[in-house]
Amino acid sequence: MKITALRETGSSSSSYRLAWVAATGDGSPAATAYLRVFTVAGAGHRAEAEIYVHPAERRRGVGGTLLDTVVAAGRELGKRTLIAGPVDAGSAGESFLTARGLRPVLSLTYTRLALTDDPPQVATPAGYRLISWEGTVPDELAATFAESRRAMDDMPMDDADFGVETWDVDRVRAIAAAIKERGDILCTVAALDESDGTIAGFTELVVPGSGTGDAQHYGTGVLPAHRGHGLARWMKIEAIRHTRTRHPGITGLLADTADSNTVMRKINDSLGYAPTHRSVLFQLDL
């Protein structure tokens, strides 16, 4: 089995990606490995691995060889943590990572909301109003939106060593640009504090460029000072309504939530999100 390192791919303002391909004696690809290396402040200690082995080539040691290659690269780069997965609970991937000495650090439940009915009505929390946009955040909201990303800093992550990432206007715009470049649509709903015009919370989802199929939730967060007013549920309901109105070809919304994030799980349950499967995130201390 020959392993070839490929040139860096998938670079962004906050990370870059290394890649390897394993080929059989006749040159046929047997497996691939990717290592996303984070450079953004607060996350520079970690890298994230993804390994795929063709079913016909499994149980022949190629996956372990690629994992060793990825681990060595992470150590050479001075990373502290290697994250792998998530992999489906009970899958061969879970068994493989466990056997290779990685430990499970975060359990996730995946859910789907079928967009067949109008979302429930909810009272407007006093002192707030909703705003929404598609694509890049409007210039006049860019600074407060970047600041509102702190709402995700204390999101339950169990034992996963993700760190606390730094956000600024440039990074917010770069992510929106990357989603647009691949042909998809970033949809954002935010709750505005009417007392000072700052963003108190947000929820994001990405609609596929085809305008059909399922859209994917990216994140929902409310700043600590504004919690307890029902803003997260209010924003999610508006995101559902926005998707049904602006993108009628979308038939469902997908979400993945840490099992320990009981607040968001309760919100999703109340809105009719149904579990589809579970997965596990693994970690190796380098």
Image: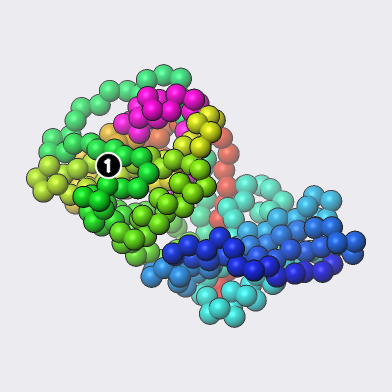
Q: Residue 248 lies in magenta, yes or no?
A: yes
Residue extending farthest top: 117
Which residue is pictured at 70% across the width and 55% down the height? 52
Q: Quadrant of residue 171?
A: bottom left
Q: Residue at x 18, y 36 (%)?
A: 129
In the rendered image of this protein, does residue 216 appear above or below residue 274?
A: below
Q: Is residue 214 left or right of residue 138?
A: right
Residue at image x 36%, y 40%? 134
User: Does residue 262 appear anywhere in the picture?
Assistant: no
Q: Along the line of sight, which residue is nearer the eye, 280 or 181?
A: 181
What residue does disc 1 label? 190
* Relative height, residue 171 to residue 5 (above, below): above
Task: Report the front residue among 147 and 122.
Answer: 147
Residue sitting at x 70%, y 70%: 5
Q: Dot 1 surroundings within 10 Å: few (below 14), some, or many (20 or more)?
A: many
Q: Which range of residues does the magenta coloring cover?
A: 237-261
Quarter of the image where the N terminus is located = bottom right
Q: Where residue 245 appears, x then y in whole percent?
A: 37, 24
Quadrant occupied by the C terminus: bottom right
Q: Is residue 155 magenta?
A: no
Secondary structure under tag 1 reads strand
The image quadrant that residue 42 belongs to is: bottom left
In percent of width and height, residue 53 lies at 75, 55
Q: Amino acid at mark 1?
A: Ala
Residue 268, percent across and down?
40, 35
